[in-house]
């Protein structure tokens, strides 16, 4: 198409959008730093303060804090009073940026961009040559995943997520057997184990680092009803053993998700329940046009979920495998009842209530 046929207005609008994208991408990095250094938490407790006062309160270097404040002010995150050379974090912004804001702290999620960016060179090579990037290439993965999971899994687990399964809290109080497949650092299991001492909790995850971290966490509370085991979840062969099995954003990452789902079906008692929390979305891109986080989820999928699976010669489902494919795969694994629920606190996930 020749340049004389270009819609100049459309072109200029796109150029403006690109400028916005560049600024927002930069702000994402600065917001992540604000979260990691505790600057948002500190500023939420301070009156309007100078960069020196903010740096001192946070125990940070003033020159770096001052430059960070420049990005935050020009990005509309923090207010600036130039006469007094002071800065303040509006309360309306703090409710989305501080650790006190859990489960609504969006600053937690900004960490993913720098984490994904750290493997960009490797992903570019995969575009050219295929293959994938393994878990161990993502240096802060378990730390960031724990932060994210605390919001989307741990905080709402007892009062919002478990009640999606009628009667399950009463059964947990009486005492049942629970398995978390792909448990990561096991924080969800520890959280439940403290609340339901009569129930026995088991977690499987392929990462020994994550299992060691979770075991140490359970030991801090002196728990004797939690067992975390380093295991490839495509290989476990428990039979009719568990009353409740959970997976929290774990299935789409698997190299062999069909086999994992079949293993879960075999391990679940006939009257048991399988709770699968996984990414909200459709298997068809045209159905995701109105998804508020679709670009982020596809990016995370391309640069983590999909590539990790492909690095193991796996299926490479990706985070946006979608409810249509997920439902088909669950039924192919031998389950007959699949109910999909949503929760207002969590725009990222669906909650599948699955039975034999």
Image (tube, rainbow, N blue to C red):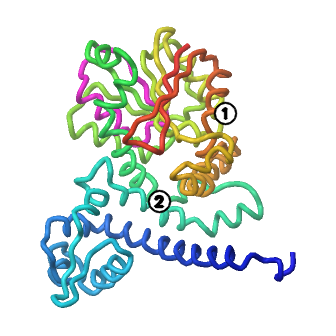
Q: Position of residue 143 (x, y in %)?
A: 39, 54
Write down the quadrant of residue 254 in the picture. Answer: top right
Q: Position of residue 161 (x, y in %)?
A: 37, 30
Write down the quadrant of residue 18 in the picture. Answer: bottom right
Q: Is residue 181 magenta?
A: yes
The nearer-to-camera label among 1 and 2 is 1
Give the farthest residue toward the left: 47
Residue drawn at the location 42% of the way across and 50% of the way down = 145
Q: Which mark is residue 47?
A: none
Asked if residue 170 lies left or right of residue 329, the reply is left
Q: Is residue 158 magenta?
A: no
Give the farthest residue toward the right: 1
Q: Position of residue 244 (x, y in %)?
A: 42, 20
Which residue is identified by label 2? Answer: 112
Q: Give the magenta range.
A: 175-198
Which element carries disc 1, helix, strand or loop?
helix
Give the farthest residue toward the bottom: 83
């Amino acid at each position: 198409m020749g340049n004389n046929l270009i819609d100049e207005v459309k072109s200029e609008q796109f150029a403006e959008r690109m400028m916005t994208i560049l600024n927002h991408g930069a702000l994402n990095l600065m917001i992540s730093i604000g979260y990691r250094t505790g600057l948002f938490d500190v500023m939420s407790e301070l009156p309007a303060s100078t960069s020196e006062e903010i740096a001192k309160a946070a125990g940070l270097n003033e020159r770096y804090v001052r430059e960070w404040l420049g990005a935050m002010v020009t990005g509309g995150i923090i207010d600036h009073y130039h006469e007094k050379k002071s800065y303040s974090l509006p309360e309306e912004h703090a409710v989305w940026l501080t650790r006190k804001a859990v489960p609504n702290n969006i600053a937690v999620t900004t960490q993913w961009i720098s984490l994904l960016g750290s493997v960009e060179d490797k992903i570019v090579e995969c575009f050219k040559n295929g293959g994938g990037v393994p878990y161990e290439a993502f240096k802060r993965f378990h730390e960031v995943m724990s932060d994210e999971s605390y919001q989307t899994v741990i905080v709402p687990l007892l009062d919002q997520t478990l009640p999606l399964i009628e009667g399950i809290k009463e059964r947990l109080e009486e005492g049942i057997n629970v398995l978390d497949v792909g448990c990561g650092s096991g924080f969800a299991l520890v959280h439940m184990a403290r609340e339901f001492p009569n129930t026995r909790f088991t977690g499987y995850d392929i990462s020994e680092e994550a299992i060691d971290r979770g075991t140490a966490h359970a030991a801090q509370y002196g728990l004797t009803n939690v067992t975390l085991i380093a295991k490839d979840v495509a290989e476990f062969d428990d039979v009719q053993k568990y009353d409740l099995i959970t997976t929290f954003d774990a299935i789409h990452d698997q190299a062999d998700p069909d086999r994992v789902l079949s293993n879960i079906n075999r391990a679940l008692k006939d009257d048991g329940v399988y709770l699968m929390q996984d990414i909200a979305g459709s298997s068809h891109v045209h159905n995701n046009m109105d998804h508020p986080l679709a670009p982020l989820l596809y990016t995370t999928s391309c640069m983590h979920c999909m590539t990790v699976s492909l690095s193991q010669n796996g299926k490479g489902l990706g985070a946006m495998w979608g409810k249509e494919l997920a439902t088909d795969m669950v039924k192919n694994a031998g389950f007959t009842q699949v109910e999909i629920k949503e929760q207002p606190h969590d725009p990222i996930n669906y909650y599948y209530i699955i039975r034999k």
